[in-house]
Image (tube, grey):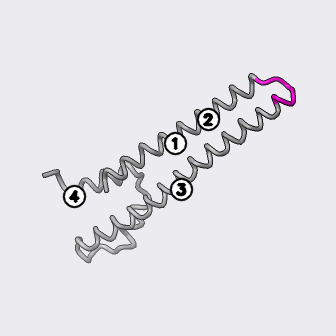
């Protein structure tokens, strides 16, 4: 599970880089074209390719966000299956909701304990 979250963060960073690269490539190529019918057709092609790339990256981002929500839910359920009943699920869920992903990974490592 920990490796999955680290991998998801790497994929997220790679997708952001893909978006930036697609936009830069499109801007460069569009700037090089001059006002003719062929130029207009090529600008439309560039626009369409850029849109498709960004749409693909957005799907990846949404998929990873859903996986992160499911992982968070599993972490909470696992914690409460192992923890004392004195701490309420709602309090712990509210606390986890406000913690950044990297801190959640650190918290998970703390809960699991040192590697054997």
The residue lying at 39 percent from left, 67 percent from top is 73
Q: Which residue is mark 3?
A: 62
Q: Which residue is mark 2?
A: 22
Q: Magenta stretch?
A: 33-39
First in sequence: mark 2 or mark 3?
2
Discs 2/3, front: 2
Please tell me whether residue 82 is drawn above or below residue 58 in the rendered image.
Answer: below
- Badge 2 vs badge 3, beta-carbon distance below 8 Å: no
Q: Which residue is mark 1?
A: 15
Q: Secondary structure at mark 4?
A: helix
Q: Is residue 82 left or right of residue 54?
A: left
The residue lying at 53 percent from left, 40 percent from top is 16
Please tell me whether residue 89 is drawn above or below residue 101 in the rendered image.
Answer: below
Residue lying at the far bottom of the rendered structure: 85
Q: Which residue is mark 4?
A: 112
Q: Secondary structure at mark 1?
A: helix
Horizontal and vertical percent position of residue 56: 58, 48
The residue lying at 73 percent from left, 37 percent from top is 45
Discs 1/4, front: 1
Q: Secondary structure at mark 3?
A: helix
First in sequence: mark 1 or mark 2?
1
């Amino acid at each position: 599970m920990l490796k999955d979250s680290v991998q998801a963060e790497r994929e997220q960073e790679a997708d952001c880089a893909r978006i930036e690269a697609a936009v830069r490539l499109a801007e460069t190529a569009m700037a090089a074209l001059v006002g003719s019918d062929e130029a207009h057709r090529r600008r439309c092609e560039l626009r369409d390719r850029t849109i498709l790339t960004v749409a693909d990256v957005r799907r990846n981002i949404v998929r990873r966000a859903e996986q992160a929500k499911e992982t968070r839910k599993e972490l909470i359920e696992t914690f409460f299956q192992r923890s004392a009943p004195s701490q309420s699920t709602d309090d712990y869920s509210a606390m986890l909701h406000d913690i950044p992903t990297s801190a959640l990974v650190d918290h998970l490592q703390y809960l699991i304990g040192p590697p054997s």
